[in-house]
Image (spheres, coloured by chain):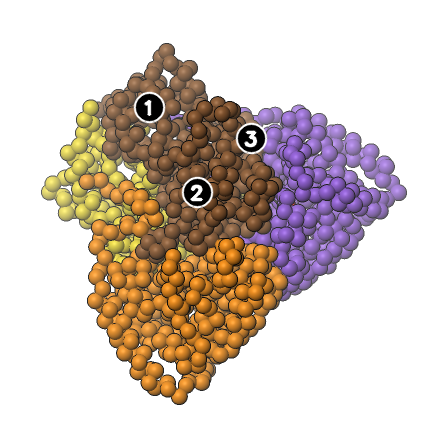
Chain colours: A brown, B yellow, C orange, D purple
Amino acid sequence: MSWLSYPKALNRALADALAEDETVCVLGEDVGAGMAGVTLGLRDRFGAGRIVDTPLSEQAFTSMGVGAALAGMRPVIELQIPSLLFLAFEQIANQAHKFSLMTGGQARVPLTVVVPGSGSRLGWAGQHSDQPYSLFAHVGVKTVVPATPSDAYGLLATAIRDDDPVLLFAPAGALPVREDVVAPLVPIPLGSARIHRPGTEVTVLAIGHLVHEALAVAEELAGEVDIEVLDPRTLHPFDWEALGDSLERTGRLVVLDDANRSCGFAAEVLATASEEFRLVAPPRRVTRPDGAVLPFAPELDRALQPSREQLRTAVRGVLKGGWAW
Amino acid sequence: MSWLSYPKALNRALADALAEDETVCVLGEDVGAGMAGVTLGLRDRFGAGRIVDTPLSEQAFTSMGVGAALAGMRPVIELQIPSLLFLAFEQIANQAHKFSLMTGGQARVPLTVVVPGSGSRLGWAGQHSDQPYSLFAHVGVKTVVPATPSDAYGLLATAIRDDDPVLLFAPAGALPVREDVVAPLVPIPLGSARIHRPGTEVTVLAIGHLVHEALAVAEELAGEVDIEVLDPRTLHPFDWEALGDSLERTGRLVVLDDANRSCGFAAEVLATASEEFRLVAPPRRVTRPDGAVLPFAPELDRALQPSREQLRTAVRGVLKGGWAW
Amino acid sequence: MTQVSSPTLETPAERYRMMRLIREFETRALALVREGLIVGGTHPYTGQEAVAVGVCAALRTGDQLTSTHRGHGHVLAKGADPGRLLAELLGRENGLNHGRGGSMHAADLSLGILGANGMVGAGAPIAVGAAWAAGRRGRDTVVAAFFGDGALNQGVLLESLNLAAIWRVPVVFVCENNGYATTLPASAGVAGSAVGRAAAFGIPAETVDGMDVAAVAAAAGRAAARARAGQGPSFLECRTYRFEGHHTVERRMKLSYRDAAEVAAWRARDPLLLDPPAEAASIDAEVAELLDRAEEFARAGAVPAATGASRYLYADGLRARAGAGA
Amino acid sequence: MTQVSSPTLETPAERYRMMRLIREFETRALALVREGLIVGGTHPYTGQEAVAVGVCAALRTGDQLTSTHRGHGHVLAKGADPGRLLAELLGRENGLNHGRGGSMHAADLSLGILGANGMVGAGAPIAVGAAWAAGRRGRDTVVAAFFGDGALNQGVLLESLNLAAIWRVPVVFVCENNGYATTLPASAGVAGSAVGRAAAFGIPAETVDGMDVAAVAAAAGRAAARARAGQGPSFLECRTYRFEGHHTVERRMKLSYRDAAEVAAWRARDPLLLDPPAEAASIDAEVAELLDRAEEFARAGAVPAATGASRYLYADGLRARAGAGA
Ligand SMILES: Cc1ncc(C[n+]2csc(CCOP(=O)(O)OP(=O)(O)O)c2C)c(N)n1
Ligand SMILES: Cc1ncc(C[n+]2csc(CCOP(=O)(O)OP(=O)(O)O)c2C)c(N)n1
Ligand SMILES: [Mg+2]
Ligand SMILES: [Mg+2]
């Protein structure tokens, strides 16, 4: 194979699922035209009956997805921007997520929601730059944040086949990533982490596009410290075993997470690690600030996103640190 | 003064604010009749122009509150059940919360949202039993969870006077609490914790109605361990100083939190404590399970809520524990 | 999902019987609330029976419905077993949802009952989705979406009307206008009219006497026929009344939003008294006996074991982390 | 909030001038996008000028409006300083929002401009709330809520129509029907009609030629008068067209949702060509000069210091915890 872009990987996963299973369909705004890249060319191939352009009615068409799922389909919903999840929050968190338990196992809701560009896109400002995956991990919706094209393919493929609602965040920062794909693209199970770079001294757990930042810093500091870069790939269910194993080796933890700090996913990782795993020094996290709203001006927008400089400082901090008491 | 119930305390805070400031008004479903208790009698006293019964349009009337706030009022929105927050999530997280920053400080949004009964009410089942305060702490909305009638009065009084949106959760489990109020009821600043019971060996940080559970367990175990019960009262902003001081004394932490586990508020407390404070043993938290949906049957509903038994186990666990490495 | 047969509700006697069944069911449920056995109370359907029965008379096996917080009538009229519904209200393993849903989430997917719903208006887009899926798959399924007058002001419901209209989805929207959303009179909450709202989306809409089961059945029959003929959605406003309070808890509150004369006037139009069949007395007796057995079945149900509290959380069996360590 | 005077837009020349100002502003903004100085691009208002200007002609100082993602026209027509708006698009401290909002959140509260908004339909309930508040406080303020045809399908917008109607709130709902929501034709998205939808809520509604500023101003004048007379909301559907793509990024994409003939037909109805005043040439020159100065002002603005990235997050100055320790 050859160079695969991230949006193309999602596109291919969708196309393969549509080709394979006629109960798969796509609903969303401008999916016919493929504005977000993810559905490009699919209407021509599969028809407007399966690649459905919706009016701007996020609540209703998301719940339509639930109804269609109850009726035996596997709908994929595209929500153009992350804040559309706020509009459809009730439909995802309170309907889709809860149907299985509330019906005592009668209902399954194989609904996939794809956000093709979460987090900052410079210049999109306060309402279009959130990274809200932690909200859904809290609610308990299966939540996936692929960092690479092949993971994007594999996780979307699995998400569509999963019998529960799954939310896939494609971080805007990861969309430019291209990968020289040699092995065939295959489904990747939810809840399985990936070690991008083995290391012995510090575990850096990074989410989504920040995996690539972590790798860059790890290379940069290679002479100074041996960093393991761990990508959980799915936030819920989370691969706690992989984290535990990594910390068995390193004993030191830094989490790099583009979400707001308070109650963000990094908090969960630190909490569980401090409860359950071997830590020889206080862990650290690099996140957005509490309650962050990204300002428009690019300089300010960037200033609120986790940076390599902050990661370097955190890594050096955990290296020096130890339980002082 | 005399015995004050929790709903009556909220009712009094509202009445005092309405009497004092003519820009205060209340919008919500059945607030005229005072179905939830919080607004009982207010329409008779202040008129239907200020205590406004709304149609079932949570999105629109919440955002109306934003508009009215921009126009100089201090609206209080009552949302009957916690899941109505999911419907109005966009309006709270993406509009109300962001207006100040996005307008470069031109706009202030003094909006208060009150949920008069969050968490389990036995028999209300999956869609009416959530405890979603962590979501809003993550977003960065000022979030208040009073445990006692006088705190309910004082925090609601402050919330209404605050120039930012504030969300007040009255946990259903705290509504039956009555208090023999001797001192006059006064506003309580946001971001100030309260030590309900000083102690020297373990800090139990408990939220909302669980403060009372923590106090009961602390008394019960008094011969065995000296527990400090700390109530943060506001989750955002959080009184980190009070937590740090408490851990200086005890070095051991258990958090008792009715939210879902992953990315819940307890995770934030453990994360920050492990990063920044003195801990002589791994901390613990007692929460709902990951992704919890409360089943209808009372026995199952109770089984998913944090219990005294779990708290006792956790306290004994942190007492025994120590950093093993 | 194997489809279980829906009841036939073709004759006046069959309809009367189903209305009586719902009435009796609600009466017993009320007693069980008072007894403390139905925890959390219920939203009684008493008074509105003709709507559920008239609409379900137009539905066939394989058709589906979405219901509301006030759902017992819809669930029974589509054929759910009264014993299993009652067991559900008692939170028992032998309940429709194994005690996981209770009154507000009662469902029987094998009968096409996609669930009562705790959120006002939330069932409508689910109905649209199910009907759209059936249409796409070439089935002539009809889906009925029940909701109250209060739901007319929910954004998601209005969005759903639009989607159903543009895509000609085989849905029958059934607005049970009982005059109030809890304490708010429909006249104070709904600008314009229910049918005017639907008509604005190009949906054929009519108002029907919701106390008259034959009138409801006729209108629902026309709507269902349109849906099966590929002519898309229809909208029925059924004018009705709830004889009880909004929720059983209301019995313990002093509320004055409806006056006694109004309640009496509507009670005089009780759907069960409008046109009872000759054999009413024997039907009543048969229903009473059936509900005796149902109640026995429900009371005998096992309380679910606490260890299964998170069972069914994920359809694929994923087990969530517990809320506390060992 | 001290109120700054709104511009007068009474004479044809004043209206032409404002339309030219908006057109010129958008032309320069486009150039600045290409130059890479406006990061994130914009949603050009080009073609729709008559709507903003016609509606704002009916507004007075003290009146307010809520705008959309395509907001430059509304913001300018209500009197915002072009230099400060342009500076905002460049992300400068001297921008309307100190560079914190950009195109999609441009606001000037001193002029009653409650903000462009990134979420379709989200401005409408804010407008209703502001108008309701003004009404309660005995002011005869009118609030205009601008939105596109796409917003007609947003639940919150439909909910807002209902609230405005039942409470007779002094709002003018202005639907700018430019035929498309991004790539979706209004005909494929909107069942029924825009005005039919408003009328269903009992709101007086009319369709007006959105390329004719005089027609828009007349209709908006009637609507504002009704609002000031306590007669509640009105609804205008302004038929218009955007001459550019949905967003500047569209220039780099191959999209085929509109055909060239359609674009040409609408361009022929350019509001600036419809009925230009005799002094058009001198107005054009004056506007060009004004925008030269505006651009100078904007380009000279300081880039905000990164240390102030979280400034204004809370109105009371609460400082949020940083995203990384020291
Ligand atoms: C979206 C939403 N808002 C509010 C509530 C609380 N609530 C439950 S039932 C109800 C009234 C519903 O009125 P209506 O739709 O007319 O149905 P009815 O109760 O009359 O059958 C309210 C306010 C809710 N469950 N969901
Ligand atoms: C609620 C919501 N859904 C989707 C989007 C993404 N989006 C931005 S503008 C737009 C199209 C809006 O169409 P319309 O309302 O007709 O306004 P126009 O762009 O034509 O001016 C879309 C889909 C959004 N910002 N908000
Ligand atoms: Mg009703
Ligand atoms: Mg448009």
> Is label 2 in a helix, a strand or a loop?
helix
In 3D space, how far apart are the residues under numbered discs 3 and 2 (Cα atoms)? 30 Å
Query: What's the residue at 46%, 45% (across, down)?
Result: A21
Give the side of residue A54 with respect to residue B309, left or right: right
Image quadrant where residue C197 sits: bottom right
Residue A203's disc number: 1
Residue B61, x across and y down, in percent: 51, 55
Q: Is residue A36 above or below residue A163?
A: above
**How much space separates mark 1 and mark 3, taking CA atoms?**
29 Å
Please tell me which of labels 3 and 2 falls first in the chain: 3
Q: Is residue A40 visible?
A: yes
> Do pointers 3 and 2 mark residues of a single chain?
yes
Q: Can you tell which mark lies on residue B243? A: none
Residue labelled with disc 3: A122
In the rendered structure, find residue A160 and report the number of the disc placed on it.
2
Viewer-nearest of discs 3 and 2: 2
Percent across and percent down for residue A15 are 51, 39
**D2 vs C146, nearest the viewer:** C146
What residue appears at the point 37 percent right and 86 percent down from the top-left corner?
C279
Type of amino acid at the residue the image marks with label 1: Thr
State the residue at coordinates (36%, 28%).
A194
Quick check: is the Cβ at mark 3 less than 8 Å away from ligand 2? no
User: What is the count of numbered marks?
Assistant: 3
| Amino acid type, residue under disc 2 in the picture | Ile
The Cα atoms of the two marked residues, 2 and 1, are separated by: 31 Å
Q: Residue at x 24, y 51 (%)?
A: C308
Q: The numbered mark 2 sits on a residue in which chain?
A: A
